[in-house]
Amino acid sequence: MEGRFVLAEGRGWLTVREQQGRAVCCAQIPDDQRGLYKCWLVGPTGKALLGTFVPQEGALRLERTLSVSELKRQGAWPPEGGEAALAFTFGGKEGPPQGWSRVDAPGQLLGEPLLSAAARGPALMRREENGFLLAYRYEPDSPFPLTPLFCFARLMQLNGRDYLCFPFRPGGCPRLEEL
């Protein structure tokens, strides 16, 4: 089994190669100097932490060899993809909540041109079986994100902070019935 998967919104990659009952995983993302990033192997029913990227030759890289049986136990085998997420920023701030990733250009995820133009970054994103969620930090004194969906925003707490959350279908159209 051999596979190559996209990471970091197309800016990075993860390769997985099975060799004598072991999975050899190699990944690379750009080094944006923002903090420490972690990488997961995603399978049909779960995901397995591969580890933390380390700086090498101007990029962030990761190489791990894990047993296929352990990856199966965690639901990450056979692999279906990978995830890379900021876990800790160098400014001392925490990274995104568990299961969420930062998206600097959320408009690229949305299928409706009006919403795409209104969706400015950064935002948080969490993939779900029936699409994805976008969450924006709620700050009463700041402009409201995604103004066209103002009436449908749902207030959520993530890591003890208020966020406005919007669910979308896989193609980027709102799932208004769930708001």
Image (cartoon, helix red, strand yellow):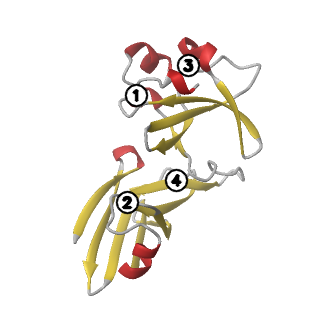
Mark 3 or mark 4: whose residue is earlier in sequence: 4
Q: Position of residue 179 (x, y in %)?
A: 59, 25
Q: Residues within 10 Å of mark 1 (few under 14, many from 20)?
A: many
Secondary element type, mark 2: loop
Q: Which residue does the numbered mark 4 point to in the structure image?
A: 85
Q: Residues within 10 Å of mark 2 (few under 14, many from 20)?
A: some
The mark lying in front, picked from 2 and 4, is 2
Mark 3 or mark 1: whose residue is earlier in sequence: 3
Q: Amino acid at mark 4?
A: Ala
Q: Which residue does the numbered mark 1 point to in the structure image?
A: 172
Q: Amino acid at mark 3?
A: Leu
Q: Amino acid at mark 1?
A: Gly
The mark lying in front, picked from 3 and 1, is 1
Q: Which residue does the numbered mark 3 point to in the structure image?
A: 146
Q: Quadrant of the N terminus?
A: bottom left
122 left or right, relative to 13: right
The mark lying in front, picked from 4 and 1, is 1
Mark 2 or mark 1: whose residue is earlier in sequence: 2
Look at the numbered discs 3 and 1 and tell me whether their residues touch, using CB distance below 8 Å. Answer: no
Q: Amino acid at mark 2?
A: Pro
